[in-house]
Image (cartoon, grey):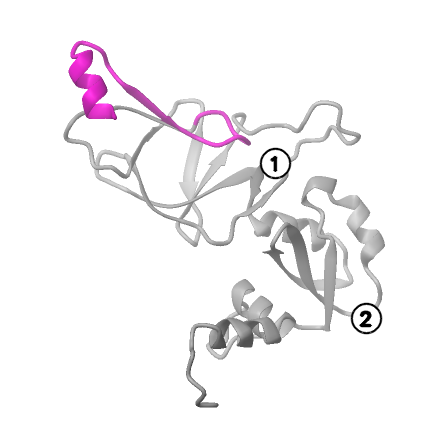
Amino acid sequence: LLPNLQAQFPTVNIHIFYGCTETLRACHHIWTQDDAENILGKALPSAILAQNEAGELIQQGATLMLGYWNEATPEPSYPESHILGDVVTQDKRDQWLFQLRSHDIIKTRGIRISPVKIEEFLLHNSNILEAIVFQNGDIIEAVLALATMQDMSEHLLSIPHWIRPTKLHYVHKTLPHSPRGKKSRQWIARNVIYPKAAVRAHQAPSSSKDPH
């Protein structure tokens, strides 16, 4: 599309902007024929961009949305930072380059949010020692490691309703670790919380009668 558009309007600059619903625009660049397809552009002056430990692009500062109209709790939804959901690198010209889409981002009611943000809300309660959040279809679920085993549903009322987990799983004191020693959301969801689903998914592609 862009080469055809530039051919029809050779004197026009094509400006590419990158961002998401929860932020103002994050990146900008003027497209050229020599561009790599994965260029997101340079950070706009109004946006503070950085990478987190997972290599995902995060946006900070006044460019974050404060919330939604007519919400019962008007306090900022993203008071510190927002993970845009893309794993990126940066070249020598300070251009952000898209690498892949993060699998951890949760989309709920049209909002994209990192499960880390929901986990931070959960950890405000002193009885919750560790938390992992994952999405199961349209449902947000949380696995909570508790100092004292008890129902934590009432604590969820302090979390904005659009990112509130609707199903809780409890373990005592520490979250399960994968065979590699990591607290992986995907591994816990597939092998601890829903192990039968993981087995069915593993067996489904095979048509062999061999029980192994």
What's drawn in magenta, residue-wise? 1-25
Find disc 2 in the rendering and name its residue.
149
Query: Which numbered dot is residue 78?
Result: 1
Q: Position of residue 189 (x, y in %)?
A: 59, 67
Residue depicted at 67% across the width and 44% down the height: 163
Q: Is residue 133 above or below residue 192?
A: above
Quadrant, the N terminus: top left
Q: Amino acid at mark 1?
A: Tyr
Mark 2 or mark 1, which is nearer the start of the sequence? Answer: 1
Image-based side of 192 in relation to 51, left or right: right
In the rendered image, the residue lying farthest to the top is 11
Whether residue 22 appears in magenta in the rendering, the answer is yes
Q: Number of numbered discs present?
A: 2
Residue depicted at 77% across the width and 31% down the height: 73
Image-based side of 1 in relation to 52, left or right: left
Residue depicted at 66% across the width and 53% down the height: 140
Q: Is residue 100 visible?
A: yes
Give SS at disc 2. Answer: loop
Image-based side of 38 in relation to 101, left or right: left
Residue depicted at 48% across the width and 75% down the height: 202
C-alpha span from label 1 to label 2 = 30 Å
Q: Is residue 55 above or below residue 145?
A: above
Q: Quadrant of residue 176?
A: bottom right
Query: Which numbered dot is residue 105?
Result: none
Q: Amino acid at mark 2?
A: Met
Q: Is residue 175 visible?
A: no
Give SS at disc 1. Answer: loop
**Tags 1 and 2 in contact by the CB under 8 Å rule?**
no
